[in-house]
Image: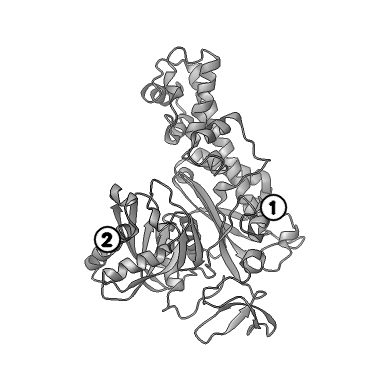
Amino acid sequence: MVVEMHAGLASDGGSKLKMLLTFVDALPNGNEEGIYYSIDLGGTNFRVLRVEVGAGSVIINQKVEHQPIPEELTKGTTEDLFNFVALALKSFLEREDDQDVKRALGFTFSFPVRQNSVSSGSLIRWTKGFSIEDTVGKDVAQCLNDALARCGLNVRVTALVNDTVGTLALGHYYDEDTVAAVIIGSGTNACYIERTDAIIKCQGLLTNSGGMVSYFFCFICSQYDFFMKCLCEEKELWCSKCSIHQVVNMEWGNFWSSHLPRTLYDISLDDETQNRNDQGFEKMISGMYLGEIARLVLHRMAQESDVFGDAADSLSNPFILSTPFLAAIREDDSPDLSEVRRVLQEHLKIPDAPLKTRRLVVKVCDIVTRRAARLAAAGIVGILKKLGRDGSGGVASTSSSSGGRARGQQPRRTVVAIEGGLYQGYPVLREYLDEALVEILGEEVARSVTLRVTEDGSGIGAALLAAVHSSNSQQQVPI
């Protein structure tokens, strides 16, 4: 994982890990105040949020409104889709009596985007059933801004993020030791805070202030070095040595390595999917696929034995065993495995499976779950190792600001924000993940690492990033 992270930071296309620049170089720290909005668009439903924050990491009030997107708009035109979103926000603002006040907007857009700045980015491709061809290549933030202007709203996108970055922002808002965020739900992804001078491919790119990275005088350390960012309206500048960091979106679902334990069932699953040869890590971990892996195993058993008798035809149907059913099977602790019997009868059409067979089904679901949890844990440790926070004392931890420790020192406290229905709703997976972290890191270092559930980071976190990066923010404090 660490080798691929370095390769992805060095050049675009250098790794299966895209290591996308987010241009988020300041995170909420609890000093934000005011009312901010966000729109969370990541599927056939979207949400509008109003978040009122006060100094001291206090969310005074929040309001959320869900809106379904009509199916015809997912295949229509760019203007129709964003007009629909803008009108929903206008209706929301009118009910809040805030439509005439200038407001900053965070825009969570959970589709593949190549960011151009913290508030702009071009759509790479649609996923999740959307197929609006004229949007590809366009700046989605500008598309929304144009629609907002057509509606007469005094609202502009000040932060364009995906759900992992929003989760990191909300985690950092409550705890400044938060250095990474992981999503483990129907899909999986991760982001983390990286030193800008370690992102080789970003040299020469636009910074948030609109200037080019170039040679300049640093007002902090009084040395000439690469200009990285304007600190405030007076255009004071600091250099790459002065604790400049940026959030990197790993897109780790696409991670691949010859070291991953790929089985015949993983190959069969990959062959079933539309994105064949992509998202290999995600297909071993996320909720969209775990039930299907278990089904493929059970189907192979049914073909090679009479363990399910003559009633196993339904096991040949792809995705008939969803991950929630896998979890229900694994968590059944009744003496006769009555819940397993119910799932087999009602959903797999396998009646009268004997207790021995039901135990075998539980074992299969347990193995699939345990592997997913351990791989996710290994990915998290990969991030910690890259940051020098895994206790190894390796090369990555030599930087004074990386969080490494000298020999004899206690490991530095580290928080990883986690969101996603699979992680939050499946206690067995959480237990296996925690167990693997201790196994890899050792008990002493593992005690310094906290995995913290951060609910609704994709919505609230985007609003907080809008607060940080809005024009009425007096000073953006670097990460």
What SS does tag 2 mark? helix
Q: Earlier in the sequence, mark 1 or mark 2?
A: 1
Q: CA distance from mark 1 to mark 2?
A: 44 Å
Residue tagged by mark 1?
3
- Does residue 75 lie above or below 53 as drawn? above
Cβ atoms at labels 1 and 2 below 8 Å apart: no
Name which residue type carries label 2.
Ala
**In the image, residue 76 lies at what x, y percent?**
31, 52
Q: Among all residues in the image, which is located at the extreme right? A: 407
Q: Residue at x 23, y 71 (%)?
A: 97
Q: Residue at x 54, y 69 (%)?
A: 25
- State whether residue 199 appears in this view: no
**In the image, residue 44 lies at what x, y percent?**
34, 49
Q: Among all residues in the image, which is located at the extreme front? A: 134
Name which residue type carries label 1.
Val
Nearer to me, 133 or 275:
133
**In the image, residue 157 lies at what x, y percent?**
39, 69
Nearer to me, 58 or 250:
250
Q: Residue at x 60, y 42 (%)?
A: 375
- Does residue 201 lie above or below 338 as drawn? below
- Does residue 237 lie above or below 396 as drawn? below
Graded by Cα atoms within 10 Å as few (under 14), some (14 to 19) or many (20 or more), the crowding at tag 2 reads: some
* Residue 313 in the figure: left or right of residue 148: right
Nearer to me, 461 or 116:
116
**In the image, residue 57 lies at what x, y percent?**
44, 68
* Residue 338 in the figure: left or right of residue 294: left
What SS does tag 1 mark? helix
Snapshot quadrant of residue 18: bottom right
The circle drawn on residue 88 is: 2
Q: Quadrant of the C terminus?
A: bottom right
